[in-house]
Every structure is written in structure tokens, then in C-alpha cells.
């Protein structure tokens, strides 16, 4: 009896799910058919708007179709820059759909809100600032970051006043932050970056130093290199070593080449290849026997990059190498240099 | 006697209902995760812009007797859309012309690699680099099995993440980008995997999937429903609980230092892919270190399913042995008070339902049939039992089809849906029972112990057009 009852219940549930499956499929097919012609029209109109500032505005979609339209325009906006992007944004603003987009951000589900938030950024809608600023502090990492990115597109200098908060939000990945800062450009990123780096104990220093690459290198390098001598945190030293570009930092770099953390030694070996002279040879040759493969590899690369070290000299170092490890690494690097 | 058979009947019934209820629960758990994943697609699907923070990836391709497909596979991998990656093909002592094909196609020449043996492996004969593609290297080594080939690949690899794939896996151009995303979003990530789909019936050209279709071969069709169940709510359900115990060997990405610290792939198991994941859970849990294993629901890897009973049987026996070995070698995960969801939920589930389940299921069918034959239960009761097995299985498969419909919707025609529904019904009429029997054979062979070796999968490749 129990088996029969459970079987009947399971079968009945299966039938209900099957009906749902068929209904969903039919509804989707009908929707796709209905939208196909409109999407083609929107696409064509968006392309026309992109090419001409005086072109006709695209047809206004019905409210229920607005997210589909915005998703289409978002894709297009992500692949264009400059005048084409300006033209497209102007044409879309002229459609009078901003209030409808605001309404989506305020009310609908996550999918449509993300579409609308991204669109507001592309449209550089300054009237959405308050709405987006509030959302950028939301606990949801995807929603908040999409809002922050839209703010950056609307007014990058104003948005970057909150760079410190952005750096502190560890649920915003460096890759996402980096993409946004890269798009904003070094002219805009550099002033707030300089201010934060000048702080004697900034929060999220390791993340900040990694993001410093999106500022003008020459303007942040000096302050970043300052951390080389003042910090004991391996990841901070590591990031600072990547900014070393002249012999003024040689003493610190030499010290870093003896650091307990192999990542720091590796970065120091690389830095020596950039700024060192043949006076660093002894240190680099010593690193060829390091326990870490990567330290040995970059030491060998740097030896080859030192001014005045010819392929013949590299071969001589290999022949005189004190260990098989060192000789093997020099042989590999020589082969790589010959191939390059 | 009568009381004992009554108790057994109830136990079998409870098991059948219990196992299916757990699957239904996994199904329900998968729904919010899938919903969230689909909701953020407007952001995730935008054209990628790289920031330079994307970790470079070494794609490891272990190859044994793959002369027919290896060149196409490597060409397909070279087209991956990712900022920085290298491809390391490990020729595991192939007895065919795998190495010769690679040398010819990619202009290989010997390279004096400063080999770093972080994980012990069989000796390698030579490392080659490609004149045409600087990011391609081929390692030629003595035969040691797939796990050994992967270990040597890890030793040779240069980048902090490695992607282990099967030589015949078909990836999409954005597969690597999608499966690496969790490493960017969650710094605790040590491993990720994605949904594997069946390529039989699809059109594949030059290693790229061009058109999705269903296979004519009924065995392959049944496996499509099976894969949908396994990935869409099996792994996704466990992912919701942070308790993914399986990343398919066909396509997975790992943090290299974590894998090296854990000892690399074990060469004495048949399920080296699952064993590694269970071991990573055990090692990190027992050390109390933060970590995460993520699952990406996107269908990002396509693979060829067996089309004959002989090959399918061999595959399922190997999988069952691999499962049993993986669990047996990492029992401490369940025993530890730090086991968390992987140790206290997923491990017992896999142990009871996936590993030892075939014993109970086969015994249950045999016992009920014997009772019916000897008059211990009525014919109607036996039919009710069979109806229960059928309807619960059908319910789970239809649930998976529904999830597929609301999510990735890969099979575009209504006729596809009709054929999949028929397959969902048909698989409960003999196929699942047969697979259960093969799994039992795998379990018995594991108990008896036998040496691990490369699986022999007859590649038909009928879907390849170039």
C-alpha cells in the first residue's frame, strides 16, 4: 500500500512537472518568435544611432520588453568606445526611457536590475546617482559592484572619492575592480590613488598596491617604493618590488633577495634584472641554487638581462655552475633566449 | 521467518524512498543556486575585458594512444579565449603515433627543460616546444597511467593554476574563462569544475562545438538524461552546501600549490579525479585552513559517451571502483569533527547511496522478485514496488529536464524535449537496473583489488566533421 501510494504520488508529480516543462517550452518559443523581429529592428536602430548623432531614435520597447532591449544595448556598449558610444547613449536618452529604467532598478528581480543598472552607467545618467550610490553599499557583491561600476561610468572622479571603500570590500574581486579602474583611465585613478598611498597605514594596503598599476606609474612609483623599506609584510614588499625601476632602491632589493618568503626573493631577482649591473652577478649566481624553482628561473633570466652579459658569458656561467640545479636552469633560460 | 521478511521488505522500501527523497532534496537545493547564477548572467555574459589579474593557467592534456584526435584537440585548445595560458600535452608512453602526429603538426623540437619534480612520477624522455605556438609544450614520458601523466604535467607546468582535461574533451572558447572565474571571486578557491555534456549527436568541427543535437544511438540518449541529473542537481545541489566531492576528470581547474601540497594525483586509484577532490577536502578540513571547491553550472565541456554496452560497462565498473577507492582512502573526512558538510553530509551520502547503494538495490530487487515468485508477497505488491522504482526515477529525470529547460535550454526543438522525456521514462525500464548491476561488479572488483590502468574508451567520433 505504501509503495503504491508513494509511486502514485511520484508519478503524479512527474506528470505535473512534465506539463510545466511543455508549457514553459511553448511559452518560450512563442516569446522568442514574438521578440525575434523586434530584436532585429532594435539591433538595426541601435547600430544606426551609434553611427550618427542625428540619426533617428530607436523605437521605444514595451515595458515588458525593456530588459531585453537594454541587454542588447549593454552588449553593444561594451564593445564600442568614444564617439560611437556617445552617439548611442544620446539616442537612447532621447527615447525617454530613463524613468522606466529607474523603475526596474527600484523594483524588479536581480536579473533585470543588473541589466538596468548597467544601462544607467552606459547612459551616464547623473540623475541616478543617489539610487546607485545606495545600491553600491548593498551586501550583495554582484549588485553593489555593478552599481559602483555604473557610478564610475557616470562620473569617475566623483566615484573614485570612494576608492578606499572599494578597496576595503574584499568581496569585490581585484579582477573586477581592475577592469573598472582600467576603463576609468590613469588620469582619473592617479589622484585618489596617490592620496590613499600617502596614508601611513592605509586599510587594504596589499590590494591597494596591486591596484596601483592602474594609476600613472611614475606618479605612484615613488610612494609605493617607500613601502619597500618600511613594511615587513611579504605581499607588500612583493608589490613594491614590482615598481622598482632605478638603482636608488638597490640596497632594499638586495635585502629582499635574502627574504624568507620565496615570492619576495623571486620578485627581487626580477628587479635585479631590471636595475642591476654586473655588480649584482654574485648575488644572482647565488640565487641559482635557491630552493625555489621560480627564484632560480628569474635569477637566470636576470643574469641574461644584465648589461654586458653575452650568450657566451651565459654559457661560461653554465659550465662553471656550482650545481646541477644552477646549470640546468641556465641551460633552459639560454634555450628560451635563443628561441625568442 | 515471516517477521524477518516483513522487516526486510520495509527496509528495502525505506531505502528506495529515502535515496530518492535525498535526490529530491538535492534538486530543491540546486534551484536557488541555479536561479542566482542565471540572474547574474547579464553581467557575466558581457564581452570580457581583462584586467591583468586573471591568473595564468597551464592546460594539462594527458594522452595515451590518441593519434586520431590529439592534433584536433590541441588546435581547439589553442583557440581558448583567455589572457594567458600554456598547453602541456603529456604523452604517456603511447604505443601509437600520438607523438609523431604532434611533432609533425606543431613543429616540435627538443627543449632542455629544468625539470622540477615536485610530485614523484615516471621518468620523462624529452620535453618539446613548438616552433609555431610558443605556449605549447609536449612531454614524452614512460607509461604510468593518467594520474602519473597529470603529475608530470604539474611538474612541468609554469602557472599557478592548472586545468586538467581529457584529450578528447571539447571545450568552448570561453570555457576556461568561465571555470576560472571562481578563483577571481573567491580567493579561498582550490578547485573548480563545470558541467560536462554529451557530444554524441552534436556537430563538432575542428574541435569546436557547432550545433547541439541529440544522438540516434539510444544508449547515448539515455546517458544524456543521466548526465543532466548528475550535473544539474547532483553537483549543483552539493555546491549549494559547499560540499562538492566530484570534479569531472574531463575538465577541472586546480590551484597548483594546494594540489602539490596534498601530494598530487594518486597513481594507484581508478578515480584519481574524485580522489583528489575528496583528499583536498580532507587535508584542508583537518588542517582547519580556509578553502573552497566551486562548481560552475554552465555547460562548458562536451565529451563522447559510450555507444556500446561493452564500453559503457567498462566505464561504469571503473567509476564505481574509483568512487569506492576515493572514499576508502579519505575516511578521516567523515570521522573528523572538522569534516563540515563535505565530511558529515556528502561523504556519508556517497558512501551509503552511491558506493554501497548497488548492493542494497540489487539485493532489494532480487529479494522482492524471490518473494513474489515464492508467494511471499502478492503480484500486485511486487508491481507496486516496481512502479515505485520507476516513478521515483522518472520524477528525478523529469526534474532535471525541467531545470535544463529553465536554465541553459540547450536542446532547441520541441522534438528534442519529447525524445528526452521518452528517454527519461525508458531509462527506468532496465537501463538503470543494468547500470546498478555493473556498479555492483565494480564494487566487488574493488573489494578483490586489481591494478589501475588507463581506461579503454573506443572513440567513434562520428560527430566530428573536421
Image: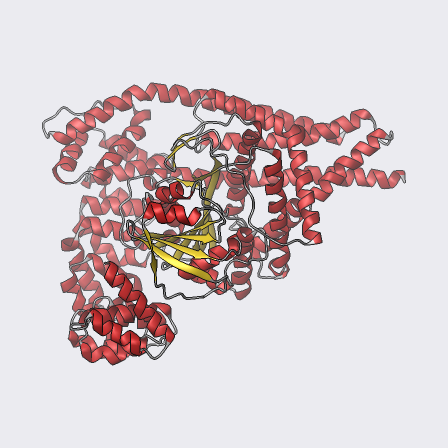
Residue drawn at x 31%, y 21% is A36
Task: Tell me the quarter of the image containing the C terminus of chain A.
Answer: bottom left
Q: State whether residue A269 is above or below residue B273.
A: below
Residue drawn at x 17%, y 34% is A89
| Residue B199 drawn at (x, y percent) | 47, 34
| Residue B289 drawn at (x, y percent) | 49, 63
Q: State whether residue A252 is above or below residue A156.
A: below
Coloration of the structure image: secondary structure
Q: State whether residue A200 is above or below residue B92.
A: below
Q: Is residue B57 left or right of residue B242?
A: left
Q: Does the rendering let one see residue A336?
A: yes
Q: Hey, which quadrant is residue A104 in on the image?
A: top left
Q: Is residue B464 left or right of residue A154?
A: right
Q: Is residue A287 left or right of residue B21?
A: left
Q: Hey, which quadrant is residue A190 in on the image?
A: bottom left
> Number of labelled discs?
0
| Residue A321 drawn at (x, y percent) | 32, 77
Task: Point out the residue furthest to the left here.
Answer: A54
Residue drawn at x 31%, y 36% is A115
Amino acid at each position: 500500500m505504501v509503495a503504491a501510494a508513494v509511486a502514485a504520488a511520484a508519478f503524479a508529480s512527474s506528470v505535473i512537472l512534465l506539463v510545466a516543462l511543455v508549457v514553459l517550452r511553448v511559452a518560450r518559443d512563442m516569446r522568442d518568435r514574438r521578440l525575434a523581429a523586434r530584436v532585429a529592428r532594435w539591433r538595426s536602430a541601435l547600430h544606426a544611432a551609434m553611427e550618427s548623432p542625428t540619426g533617428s531614435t530607436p523605437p521605444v520597447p514595451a515595458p515588458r520588453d525593456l530588459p531585453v532591449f537594454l541587454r542588447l544595448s549593454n552588449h553593444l556598449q561594451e564593445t564600442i568606445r568614444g564617439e560611437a558610444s556617445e552617439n548611442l547613449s544620446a539616442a537612447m536618452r532621447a527615447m525617454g526611457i530613463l524613468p522606466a529604467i529607474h523603475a526596474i532598478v527600484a523594483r524588479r528581480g536581480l536579473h533585470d536590475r543588473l541589466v538596468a543598472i548597467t544601462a544607467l552607467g552606459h547612459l551616464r545618467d547623473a540623475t541616478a546617482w543617489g539610487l546607485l550610490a545606495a545600491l553600491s553599499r548593498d551586501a550583495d557583491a554582484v549588485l553593489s559592484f555593478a552599481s559602483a561600476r555604473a557610478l564610475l561610468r557616470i562620473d569617475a572622479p566623483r566615484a573614485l572619492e570612494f576608492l578606499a571603500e572599494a578597496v576595503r570590500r574584499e568581496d569585490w574581486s581585484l579582477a573586477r575592480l581592475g577592469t573598472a579602474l582600467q576603463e576609468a583611465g590613469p588620469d582619473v585613478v592617479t589622484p585618489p590613488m596617490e592620496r590613499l598611498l600617502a596614508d601611513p597605514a592605509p586599510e587594504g594596503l596589499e590590494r591597494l598596491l596591486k591596484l596601483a598599476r592602474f594609476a600613472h606609474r611614475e606618479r605612484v612609483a615613488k610612494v609605493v617604493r617607500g613601502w619597500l623599506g618600511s613594511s615587513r609584510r611579504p605581499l607588500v614588499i612583493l608589490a613594491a618590488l614590482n615598481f622598482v625601476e632605478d638603482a636608488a632602491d638597490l640596497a632594499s632589493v638586495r635585502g629582499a633577495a635574502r627574504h624568507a618568503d620565496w615570492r619576495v626573493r623571486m620578485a627581487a631577482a626580477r628587479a635585479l634584472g631590471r636595475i642591476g649591473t654586473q655588480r649584482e652577478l654574485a648575488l644572482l649566481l647565488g640565487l641559482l641554487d635557491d630552493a625555489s624553482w621560480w627564484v632560480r628561473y628569474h635569477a637566470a633570466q636576470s643574469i641574461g638581462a644584465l648589461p654586458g652579459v653575452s650568450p657566451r658569458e651565459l654559457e661560461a656561467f653554465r659550465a662553471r655552475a656550482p650545481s646541477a640545479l644552477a646549470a640546468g636552469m641556465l641551460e633552459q633560460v639560454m634555450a628560451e633566449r635563443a628561441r625568442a | 521467518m515471516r517477521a524477518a521478511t516483513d522487516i526486510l521488505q520495509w527496509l528495502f522500501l525505506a531505502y528506495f524512498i529515502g535515496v530518492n527523497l535525498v535526490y529530491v532534496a538535492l534538486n530543491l537545493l540546486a534551484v536557488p543556486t541555479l536561479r542566482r547564477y542565471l540572474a547574474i548572467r547579464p553581467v557575466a555574459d558581457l564581452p570580457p575585458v581583462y584586467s591583468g589579474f586573471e591568473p595564468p593557467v597551464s592546460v594539462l592534456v594527458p594522452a595515451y594512444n590518441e593519434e586520431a584526435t590529439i592534433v584536433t584537440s590541441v588546435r581547439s585548445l589553442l583557440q581558448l579565449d583567455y589572457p594567458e595560458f600554456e598547453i602541456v600535452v603529456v604523452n604517456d608512453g603511447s604505443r601509437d603515433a600520438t607523438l609523431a602526429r604532434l611533432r609533425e603538426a606543431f613543429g616540435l623540437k627538443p627543449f632542455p627543460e629544468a625539470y622540477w619534480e615536485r610530485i614523484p612520477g615516471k621518468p620523462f624522455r624529452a620535453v618539446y616546444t613548438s616552433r609555431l605556438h610558443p605556449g605549447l609544450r609536449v612531454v614524452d614520458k614512460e607509461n604510468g597511467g593518467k594520474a602519473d601523466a597529470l603529475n608530470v604535467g604539474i611538474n612541468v607546468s609554469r602557472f599557478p593554476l592548472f586545468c586538467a582535461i581529457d584529450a578528447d574533451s571539447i571545450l568552448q572558447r570561453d570555457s576556461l574563462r568561465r571555470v576560472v572565474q571562481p578563483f577571481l571571486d573567491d580567493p579561498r578557491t582550490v578547485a573548480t569544475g563545470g558541467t560536462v555534456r554529451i557530444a554524441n549527436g552534436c556537430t563538432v568541427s575542428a574541435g569546436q562545438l557547432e550545433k547541439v543535437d541529440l544522438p540516434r544511438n539510444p544508449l547515448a540518449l539515455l546517458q544524456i538524461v543521466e548526465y543532466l541529473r548528475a550535473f544539474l542537481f547532483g553537483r549543483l545541489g552539493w555546491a549549494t552546501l559547499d560540499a562538492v566531492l566530484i570534479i569531472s576528470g574531463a575538465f577541472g581547474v586546480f590551484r597548483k600549490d594546494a594540489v602539490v601540497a596534498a601530494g598530487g594525483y594518486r597513481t594507484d586509484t581508478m578515480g584519481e579525479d574524485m580522489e583528489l577532490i575528496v583528499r583536498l577536502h580532507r587535508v584542508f578540513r583537518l588542517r582547519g585552513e580556509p578553502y573552497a571547491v566551486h562548481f560552475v553550472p554552465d555547460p562548458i565541456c562536451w565529451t563522447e559517451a559510450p555507444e556500446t554496452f561493452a564500453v559503457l560497462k567498462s566505464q561504469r565498473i571503473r567509476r564505481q571502483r574509483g568512487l569506492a577507492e576515493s572514499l576508502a582512502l579519505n575516511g578521516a573526512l567523515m570521522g573528523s569533527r572538522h569534516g563540515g558538510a563535505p565530511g558529515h553530509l556528502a561523504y556519508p551520502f556517497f558512501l551509503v547511496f552511491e558506493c554501497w547503494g548497488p548492493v542494497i538495490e540489487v539485493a532489494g530487487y532480487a529479494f522482492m522478485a524471490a518473494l513474489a515468485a515464492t508467494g511471499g508477497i502478492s503480484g500486485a505488491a511486487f508491481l507496486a514496488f516496481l512502479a515505485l522504482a520507476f516513478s521515483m526515477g522518472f520524477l528525478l529525470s523529469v526534474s532535471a529536464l525541467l531545470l535544463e529547460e529553465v536554465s541553459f535550454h540547450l536542446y532547441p526543438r520541441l522534438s528534442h524535449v519529447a525524445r528526452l522525456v521518452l528517454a527519461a521514462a525508458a531509462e527506468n525500464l532496465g537501463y538503470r537496473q543494468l547500470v546498478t548491476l555493473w556498479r555492483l561488479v565494480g564494487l566487488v572488483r574493488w573489494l578483490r583489488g586489481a591494478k589501475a590502468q588507463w581506461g579503454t574508451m573506443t572513440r567513434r567520433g562520428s560527430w566530428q566533421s573536421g
